[in-house]
Image: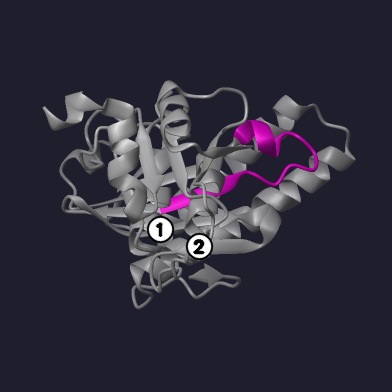
Amino acid sequence: MVHNGGVATSDAVPDAHLAAQLATEAGHLLLQVREQLIAEGAHSWQIMDTGDIASHRYLVQALHDARPDDAVLSEEGTEDPRRFTADRVWIVDPLDGTNEFGEPGRSDWAVHVALWERGDLVAGAVALPAHGVTFGTDPAFPLPASTRSQPRLITSRNRAPYAAVRVANALGCDAVRLGSAGAKAMAVVIGEADIYVHDGGMYQWDSAAPAAVALAAGLHASRIDGTPLVYNARDPWLPDLLICRPELADAVLDAIWGERRRA
């Protein structure tokens, strides 16, 4: 579902709604920070750093207030050792696409908020603040039908991952470049693209919320070898990701691995 407003933070608020509210409100904060610093002529590095810190502090405090017994894994935070034994862990990226956030006029950056509970992602939201929308898991965004004759693959702005090149060549994809992982994943969710594959390295917070939203929408989400995405592992490194339309998953995985996948 696309969310355009917030709800009150309390124990009565469902986790999915809380995720969407916090991602949306962090996005509003980031827009204010960005506008003010650009108006002051701040350097892009100052804009990026200030945005990262402001969003992180807001999310950590808001989660502490709303769900004080839950642990938090955040890109910008120090390790919370409670997460290794906790049943519930919020995995957040306060500002996904920091470089894009630092460039005036760019809209391909996001805020990620996801909840892991006893081995599974149970709620998540990806806010695209510059577009004024937040995608959540409950209700899920309805997967649109695809009318393209050739799949559209979305990949990073500055590099084409090896796996993406293999998929594009094998499936004859049209390729589109975009910034943050959240923006790329949501392009698949709304049907602007059909495949997002990344093998260039990332962390759990880069993909947790996008994967939660994509899975809720009925998309395929996995590692690039087809194995499940595992979150709240002790090592936050989760280096690759595939999100695509379910009818394309086998073809994409075959394109990446070929005979090795079927061996």
- Left or right of residue 105, residue 162 in this image: left
| Residue range corresponding to the magenta coloring | 98-113
Q: What secondary structure is found at the residue carrying circle 1?
A: helix
Q: Position of residue 105 (x, y in %)?
A: 79, 43
Q: Is residue 97 visible?
A: yes
- Residue 185 picture location, percent across and down: 48, 48
Residue at horizontal 34 percent and vertical 73 percent from the top: 11
User: The residue tagged with tag 2: helix, strand or loop?
Assistant: strand
- Residue denoted by label 2: 135
Query: On the rendered structure, is 44 left or right of 12?
Result: right
Q: Is residue 186 above or below residue 241?
A: below
244 and 158: which is toward the camera:
244
Using the image as rendered, state which of residue 145 and residue 94 is in the foreground.
Answer: 145
Amino acid type, residue under disc 2 in the picture = Phe
Q: Residue at the location (36% across, 40% down)?
A: 242
The C terminus, quarter of image:
top left
Q: CA distance from mark 1 to mark 2?
A: 7 Å
Question: What residue sits right under mark 1 in the picture?
Answer: 213
Give the percent coordinates (x, y) of residue 89: 28, 50
Q: Is residue 259 magenta?
A: no
Q: Position of residue 148 (x, y in %)?
A: 54, 55
